[in-house]
Amino acid sequence: MPDANSLYGPLDPAPDAGWTDAQPRMGFFTDTSVCIGCKACEVACKEWNDVPGSGLDLLGMSYDNTGALTANSWRHVAFVEQPRPAAPAADAPGSSVAGPQFLGMPGARPPGRGTGAETRSDFRWLMMSDVCKHCTHAACLDVCPTGSLFRTEFGTVVVQEDICNGCGYCIPACPYGVIDQRKGDGRAWKCTLCYDRLGAGGTPACAQACPTESIQYGPLDELRERAAHRVATLHERGVPQARLYGHDPTDGVGGDGAFFLLLDDPEVYGLPPDPVVTTRDLPRMWKRAGLAALAMAAAAVAAFVGGSS
């Protein structure tokens, strides 16, 4: 299967989009190993971008009150609660319970407080602040009929709400399920990576508000180097599960402008394990359609000429 790069060309999307004065590609590196789930990024995003409130729809199984990225949640902090590993077999010395034990939410004391890592083994929380990936090869750009979605000089992808006609083509085109239509509005909305702040030399609101620097903003090449060093450090500290997601420029979307350090498989965080730009086959499809049209036209001309003679 050909990768997205062989079909779509350069890895630097801004010059490819026609920017002659393109800036260094900017993006996010989200280190989930230091995310504390404070949701400061969600609040900062809403305040700066004037995003409507998401309500208080508690899910009943988590402290997460948003559930997913939506038109009204451009940043979403996921709380992934995992049960303890499977207990030893029942016939093992000192063991009386077999199989995994699924424990609910913590009791009166907050998890981790007053308990050491050596004694706390019932469950762990994996927290991740999710966001639009600002793909190198963005299918949403390919299908937008009005030009509402465009590539900025920083390599990011932005929706112009005053041009969006609400067709919704971009929603199924996104391999990550990021874009959403706002109820009562109909237009598509998503993270802009605070394009207005970038143009003024500022930092996106979410990264500015993050107290642990879980969300890091900067030139994408520098972030990738920093992320690789962080993964190596975690491996040295005995965290072999640490891995990067969305950093590889040879993957199915040409690499993401917003990538992550994860502590488990992508599916655990609700991310696709092998995302592919959904419009990757368009060039081949258009070529075949063109050849079919030419063949039909040739057949019609032949039939007309044959009938005339």
Image (cartoon, grey):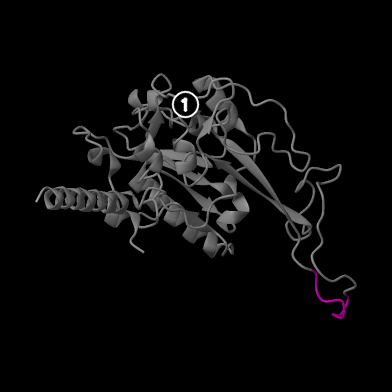
**As shown in the figure, which amino acid type bears the numbered disc 1?**
Gly
Callout 1: few (<14), some (14-19), or many (20+) C-alpha neighbours within 10 Å? some
Q: Which residue is mark 1?
A: 166
Q: Secondary structure at mark 1?
A: loop
Q: Nearer the viewer, residue 294 or 19?
A: 294
Q: Residue at x 39, y 27 (%)?
A: 195
Q: Is residue 284 above or below residue 240?
A: above
Q: Which residue lies at the image location 29% right of the left edge and 33% below the top edge?
A: 153
User: Is residue 71 on the magenta stretch?
Assistant: no
State the image coordinates of residue 279 (x, y, percent, origin top left). Answer: 38, 48
Q: Is residue 165 left or right of residue 154?
A: right
Depth check, front residue: 204 or 234: 204
The residue drawn where x is 48% and y is 55% is: 244
Residue at point 76% right, 60% down?
84
The residue lying toward the viewer, choosing from 136 and 286, is: 286
Q: Which residues are magenta?
A: 87-94
Above or below residue 163? Residue 266 is below
272 relative to 306 in the view: left or right:
right
